[in-house]
């Protein structure tokens, strides 16, 4: 029981520390005069991916690359099937009101690029540079589009309301506390989770890849799941699809891209035979909601959730 409890503790520390780091970084940037637009496109996006990034780096340094890769691939699959499926079972997600076509195409291209690099057998620093180059293109396009939208709509600073953690009047001492808690908590939580996840893998005679695809992946998807569930209950889940697409792109391009600088990431052959194609297939399932502008109804929610349960069963068997 102790490894399970310590894994859960590590996950809780990761989630709280990630939130603290985002709050501190966002408000420090605003106090220093960085535009809210830049904050939302960079600091918030990277900050919310910090737990996954720290887990991947910690896993590579502990020679557990299966957890690093499984975390990313498993999280992307969970984001589509579970994070969209469970909330839709509670209340339909009105994704027909979101125009995510361009971002969705970017995600598919990122997925194909990621799979192509995986077939080289190992993610090296050069692979990471290719992924980060793709991330730079995506960020630049998002920045230009957001800036054009702001200019066209003559925004007067109200974009601050879109950043949940923004408080332009937060005192510097409180910002400092958030930053310190985040910077200390993230590596502590990542080490706890990775070390005890590897112990659980040995206890149950499963590979660290399976642990990464299941326990770690679902754990790091909990923030997105909780947010989407609450939005569904409030009938405000119109942008859930866009959030999932954006999160998946960052997982593919940023997490593995940065992690390769801490060591090579060999690709388990099972990824090439099964898991990467499940991830791609889950992404393709979004076509009706993106291009045909359909809502994710309760029936669709049941289908997506059952597909995820079937995938987890296939991984564990």
Image: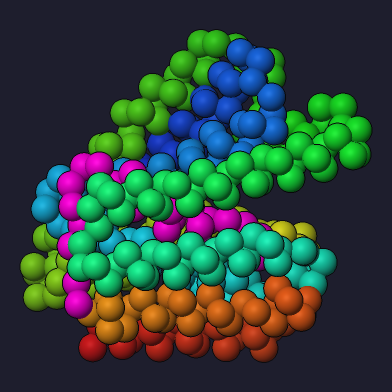
Q: Quadrant of residue 300?
A: bottom right
Residue 123 horizontal/vertical position (percent): 25, 58
Residue 271 horizontal/vertical position (percent): 27, 76
x 70%, y 66%: residue: 101
Q: Quadrant of residue 3?
A: bottom left
Residue 220 horizontal/vertical position (percent): 40, 56
Residue 42 higher or lower than 171, as above or below: below
* Count of all numbered marks drawn on residues in the image: 0
Residue 232 visible in this rendered orientation of the protein = no
Q: Quadrant of the C terminus?
A: bottom left
Residue 207 higher or lower than 26, as above or below: below
Q: Nearer the viewer, residue 248 or 166?
A: 248
x 15%, y 57%: residue: 64
Would residue 256 be counted in the magenta stretch? yes
Please give left or right for residue 139 compared with residue 288 in the image.
left
Would residue 149 be counted in the magenta stretch? no
Q: Which residues are magenta?
A: 241-269
Main structural element of the magenta stretch: helix, strand or loop? helix
Q: Quadrant of the N terminus?
A: bottom left
Residue 235 higher or lower than 20, as above or below: below
x 74%, y 45%: residue: 145
x 58%, y 76%: residue: 85
């Amino acid at each position: 029981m102790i490894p399970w409890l310590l894994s859960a503790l590590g996950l809780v520390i990761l989630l709280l520390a990630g939130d603290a780091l985002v709050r501190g970084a966002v408000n420090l940037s605003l106090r220093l005069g960085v535009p809210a637009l830049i904050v939302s496109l960079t600091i918030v996006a990277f900050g919310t991916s910090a737990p996954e990034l720290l887990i991947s780096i910690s896993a590579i340094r502990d020679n557990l690359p299966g957890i690093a890769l499984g975390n990313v691939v498993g999280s992307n699959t969970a984001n589509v099937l579970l994070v969209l499926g469970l909330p839709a079972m509670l209340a339909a997600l009105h994704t027909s009101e979101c125009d995510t076509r361009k971002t969705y195409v970017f995600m598919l291209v990122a997925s194909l690029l990621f799979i192509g690099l995986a077939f080289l057998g190992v993610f090296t620093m050069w692979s990471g540079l290719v992924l980060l180059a793709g991330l730079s293109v995506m960020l630049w396009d998002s920045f230009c589009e957001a800036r054009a939208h702001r200019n066209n709509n003559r925004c007067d600073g109200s974009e601050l309301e879109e950043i949940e953690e923004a408080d332009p009047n937060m005192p510097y001492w409180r910002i400092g506390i958030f930053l310190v808690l985040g910077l200390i908590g993230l590596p502590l939580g990542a080490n706890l989770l990775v070390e005890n996840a590897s112990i659980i893998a040995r206890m149950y005679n499963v590979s660290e890849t399976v642990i990464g695809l299941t326990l770690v992946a679902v754990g790091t998807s909990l923030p997105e799941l909780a947010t989407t569930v609450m939005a569904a209950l409030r009938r405000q889940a119109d942008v859930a699809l866009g959030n999932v697409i954006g999160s998946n792109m960052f997982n593919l391009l940023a997490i593995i891209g940065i992690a390769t600088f801490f060591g090579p990431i060999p690709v388990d052959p099972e990824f090439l035979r099964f898991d990467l194609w499940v991830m791609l297939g889950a992404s393709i399932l979004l076509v009706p909601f993106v291009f045909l502008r359909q809502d994710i109804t309760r029936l669709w929610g049941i289908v997506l959730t059952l597909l995820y349960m079937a995938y987890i069963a296939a991984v564990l068997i």
